[in-house]
Image (cartoon, rainbow, N blue to C red):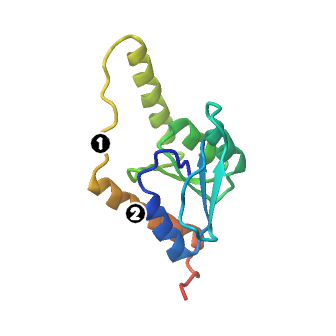
Amino acid sequence: MDADACPVKGEIYRVAKRYRLKVCMVSNRPLRTPPLPWIETVAVGDRFDAADDWIAKEVQKGDIVVTGDIPLAARCLQKGALVLGPKGRALNEDNIGEALASRELSAQLRELGIATRGPSPFQPRDRSRFLQRLDAMAQTIRGPSWTRT
């Protein structure tokens, strides 16, 4: 998980516990996390894109990556990961091109001095949507034969 400024850490911990998934929190600086053996933290330093580069290098097919960074999402999708934004938007091969194009267009407009709206504020419905979609992704990677004990 791209942990810097992630608003849904608690939801990630809940779903990971339910499905017995390992969580890897990647950030520029050390993070405080619950002292649980299935939560790993990785502090990568302050170099620009250090967390993104670490995640893209280490991600494996079938991993779930939580990030709001569209270029990182594209890199993870190329390696076969599932990608979910903190507001519950699942990114996949069908919609990543549009997301990258929209991001590029907004950047160009800002460079021209044209005001663009930033992302909408994080809402309770975003948290709910995120939790539902993360749960569904966890079920997907666990497979139909997995049962909780």
* Residue visible at 34% across and 36% down in the picture: 119
Residue found at the very far right of the displayed protein: 57
The mark nearer the N terminus, 1 or 2, is 1
Whole-percent x, y for residue 95 in the image: 47, 42
Residue 131 is marked as 2
As drawn, 53 above or below 105:
below
Sort mark 2 into few (<14), some (14-19) or many (20+) by Cα contacts within 10 Å.
many
In the rendered structure, the answer to whether residue 72 lies left or right of residue 125 reads: right
Which quadrant of the structure image shows residue 49? top right
- Binning the other alpha carbons within 10 Å of mark 1 as few (below 14), some (14 to 19) or many (20 upward) gives few
Considering every residue shown, the one lying at the far bottom of the view is 149
Residue that carries the numbered disc 1 in the rendered image: 121
The reply to whether dot 1 and dot 2 touch (C-beta < 8 Å) is no
Say which of 134 and 30 sits in front: 30
Residue at disc 1, secondary structure: loop
Q: Residue at x 60, y 41 (%)?
A: 28
Residue at image location 45% in from the left, 36% down from the top: 99
The kind of residue on which mark 2 rests is Leu
Circle on res. 112 = none
Please state the total of marks drawn on the protein image. Answer: 2
Task: Tell me what residue is drawn at x 63 percent, y 35 percent.
Answer: 46
State the residue in front, 45 or 105: 45
Secondary structure under tag 2 reads: helix
Q: Where is residue 113 in the image (x, y as percent from the top left)?
A: 35, 12
Q: In this view, does 148 lie to the left or right of 46?
A: left
The image quadrant where one finds the C terminus is bottom right
Distance from the alpha carbon under mark 1 to that under mark 2: 17 Å
